[in-house]
């Protein structure tokens, strides 16, 4: 049965000592609020790093060509390195056991029109494997296939935003788009879920690489080669594999081994390893600061509770003189501490969440995305403070309850 008299005493004590209650409550609320904000910002920073790699396969490698900066074998400096289909086939054949998917890329910027709608878009000419490297999600129709490559078909796959721009809700599959006065059949519609609905990735049009090479260049040139390495590779093996690829490409094009500009490789495994290391260090740092904040809160609430019990020594003496058992005195002070700490912790949690929500747009400018903190983590921190407050209240209350009434009444 609920002892209403007991709780009435607690609330009367709180009401009579507003400043004391405010100080102890503020200590707990501020510690929880700071804890929530700190972890929320750290999580937002980690979200930003992770989202940078969400649009591509985690085991992807991107190979770019440039110009030579070192003379070698009588060849002049500044020579343009041009990738081609032959290089694509060499890499695909020689490293077939190490490569999961591989695709060339050719970039074009063309004007697309359908009926009365018209706009400029980036064209990516690719091989079929590109779908799995870029994590393209087909929601209608299909992607570029090997038959399109073989027949140099005028088939294209459009992004969701291209469809919204040109088709006004009309089903695009089977329709023909005019790309700089050449008709192309739409065979697929895709979204890029990793980047979000407003992503520029969804303003891209894909077409067979062989078609682009024939129509827009009459050559077999490739601007970029993308691939994914065997998922069974470790991080170190993946980095060594990308170094091996670079050495082989330099050998094919007679590039000096120390020339860093002629061929550039971006290995997702290396980037992810760097991000993982950063996230690990950030997590450790946040944990140290977070627990430091909690310890400061624990020390603060402990000092306040010691002061509160000392302040109430005469009251304790009166209670004992009236026949109150020591356990009832301990229970009264302890439950008062639990109540104040619980309510303050909840208010601190709400304040931290409100501050994070209100600063979300501002934090995006500092590359902090979706700042938030696990509710269970903050509740755990609140419970820790509640336990600390309980112990901090019980110890001096236990000591004070053992004092003889006459001694407690004489206390100044």
Image (cartoon, grey):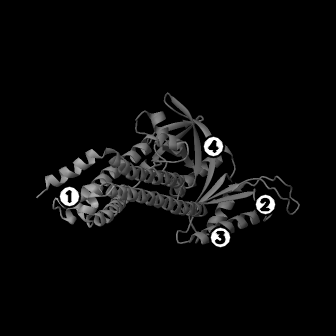
How far, Cα to Cα, is label 3 from label 1?
Answer: 77 Å
Query: What distance separates the C-alpha of mark 2 from that of mark 1?
Result: 87 Å
Name the disc covering residue 278, or none: none
Which residue position is annotated with label 4? 108
Q: CA distance from mark 3 to mark 4?
A: 32 Å
Give the residue pinned by disc 1.
319
Tell me residue 183's x, y (percent).
54, 38
Q: Residue at x 47, y 41 (%)?
A: 359
Q: Secondary structure at mark 1?
A: helix
Q: Could you tell me how far apart the alpha carbons at marks 2 and 3 are, in whole angstroms?
A: 18 Å
Task: Establish if 9 lies above or below 250.
Answer: above
Q: Mark 3 and 1 residues: CB-CB less than 8 Å, in contact?
A: no
Q: Is tag 1's residue or tag 4's residue first in the polypeptide sequence?
A: 4
Marks 1 & 4, CB-CB < 8 Å contact: no
Label 3 with label 4: CB-CB less than 8 Å: no
Please rate how many residues cluster around mark 1, counting C-alpha atoms within 10 Å: few if below 14, some from 14 to 19, many from 20. some
Can you identify the residue that label 3 sits on? 240
Give the structural element (helix, strand or loop) at label 4: strand
The residue wearing badge 2 is 259
Viewer-nearest of discs 4 and 2: 2
């Amino acid at each position: 049965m609920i002892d209403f008299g007991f709780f009435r005493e607690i609330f009367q004590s709180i009401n009579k000592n507003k400043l004391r209650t405010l100080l102890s409550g503020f200590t707990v609320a501020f510690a929880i609020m700071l804890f929530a904000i700190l972890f929320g910002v750290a999580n937002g920073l980690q979200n930003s790093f992770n989202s940078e790699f969400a649009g591509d396969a985690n085991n992807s490698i991107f190979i770019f060509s440039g110009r030579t900066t070192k003379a070698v074998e009588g060849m002049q400096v500044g020579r343009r390195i041009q990738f081609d289909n032959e290089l694509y086939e060499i890499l695909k054949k020689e490293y077939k056991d190490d490569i999961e998917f591989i695709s060339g890329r050719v970039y074009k910027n063309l004007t697309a029109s359908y009926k009365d709608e018209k706009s400029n878009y980036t064209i990516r000419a690719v091989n079929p494997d590109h779908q799995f490297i870029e994590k393209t999600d087909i929601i209608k129709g299909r992607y570029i296939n090997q038959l399109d490559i073989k027949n140099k078909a005028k088939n294209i796959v459009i992004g969701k935003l291209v469809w919204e721009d040109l088709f006004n809700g009309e089903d695009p599959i089977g329709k023909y788009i005019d790309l700089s006065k050449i008709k192309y059949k739409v065979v697929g519609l895709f979204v890029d879920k990793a980047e979000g609905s407003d992503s520029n990735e969804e303003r891209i049009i894909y077409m067979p690489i062989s078609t682009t090479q024939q129509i827009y260049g009459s050559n077999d040139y490739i601007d970029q080669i993308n691939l994914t390495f065997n998922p069974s590779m470790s991080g170190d093996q993946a980095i060594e594999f990308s170094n091996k690829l670079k050495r082989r490409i330099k050998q094919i094009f007679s590039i000096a081994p120390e020339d860093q500009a002629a061929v550039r490789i971006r290995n997702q495994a290396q980037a992810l390893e760097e991000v993982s290391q950063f996230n690990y260090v950030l997590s450790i740092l946040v944990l140290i600061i977070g627990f430091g904040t909690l310890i400061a809160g624990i020390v603060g609430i402990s000092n306040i509770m010691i002061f509160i019990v000392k302040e109430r020594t005469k009251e304790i003496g009166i209670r004992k003189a009236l026949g109150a058992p020591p356990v009832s005195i301990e229970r009264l002070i302890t439950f008062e501490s639990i109540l104040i700490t619980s309510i303050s912790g909840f208010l601190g949690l709400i304040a931290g969440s409100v501050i994070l929500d209100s600063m979300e747009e501002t934090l995006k400018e500092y590359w902090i995305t979706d700042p938030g903190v696990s509710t269970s983590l903050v509740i755990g921190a609140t419970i820790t403070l509640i336990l600390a407050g309980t112990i901090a209240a019980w110890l001096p209350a236990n000591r004070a309850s053992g004092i003889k009434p006459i001694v407690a009444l004489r206390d100044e």
